[in-house]
Amino acid sequence: MNIYESAFALSFQKTPILLVDGIARYVPGGVLPIAVFTEGLSIVNGLLDGANLNVDTLTTNFEPAAGGTLIVNDIATYPFLNQATAANAVVKRPNRITLNMTRPATTTNGGYLAKPVMFTALKLALDNHTDLGGTYTVLTPSFIYTGCLLRSMVDLTGFSDQVKQVQYKWAFEFEQPLLYESQLNATLGNLMSKFEDGIPSPGGLNWSGMFESIKSLFPS
């Protein structure tokens, strides 16, 4: 892969879900990528540094599901005096975004012996993150959803003659609660500053590498 393809794959396909605060509050920067759990990556040895990580070795893939929203409005159904009154009768609704995760058992990631260990660790981590009031940032090619809450993680796996594995495809459903514009700007700015600051730990996880990779996809 070239640099652009690697940045795109890392940001939007391999680890597009970031845990913010919650269980990540003790991690320098306060942000933890989901790949730490889905891939069993070490954050001590700097494996998520944009310069060191080989995305081809990651076996988990994510993709946005159809039906994700950018704008959702409710409009009152009673008769309006005029168009201006009708325009003022619009109520914003929270956005929802679903990411489908494909995580098959293969000979390179421990197979079926490692699978229950990984999913148990993932469930415990996400439950603990929720209990501690953590939020999520969801990266998609069209929009970065900040301050999201996890609604559900659902098994989507079907069965066919071509695919005989079970429980290898899951849907993460997120909801982005309504925030005032000032709160949204502060939330996004805080996230970007965490990326930009990186982690001042020699040989440790360096978020500045991922920040630069994401920033390169959105030239100003």
Image: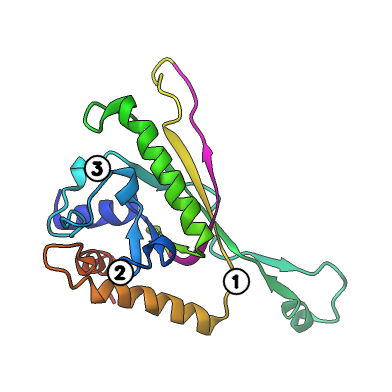
- Which amino acid, by three-letter code, is at mark 2? Phe
Foreground pick, 82 / 179? 179
Disc 2 is placed on an element classified as loop
Foreground pick, 25 / 164? 25
- Which amino acid, by three-letter code, is at mark 3? Leu
Asked whether the viewer can see residue 48, the reply is yes
Foreground pick, 7 / 179? 179
Q: How is the image coloured?
A: rainbow
Q: In this figure, which residue is indicated by the disc labeled 1?
A: 178
Q: Position of residue 45 (x, y in %)?
A: 15, 55
Q: Does the CB distance between marks 2 and 3 fall below 8 Å?
A: no
* Magenta-drawn segment: 144-160
Q: Position of residue 53 (x, y in %)?
A: 16, 52
Tell me the quarter of the picture where residue 161 sits.
Answer: top left
Q: Name the main secondary structure of what is drawn in magenta.
A: strand
Q: In this figure, which residue is indicated by the disc labeled 3?
A: 58
Label 1 or label 3, whichever comes before in sequence order: 3
Say few, some or many: other residues with alpha carbon within 10 Å of mark 1 (under 14 / 14 to 19 / 20 or more).
Answer: some
Please give the name of the residue rendered at 39% of the width and 43% of the height, measured from the top-left corner.
Answer: 121
Q: In this figure, which residue is indicated by the disc labeled 2?
A: 218
Label 2 or label 1, whichever comes before in sequence order: 1
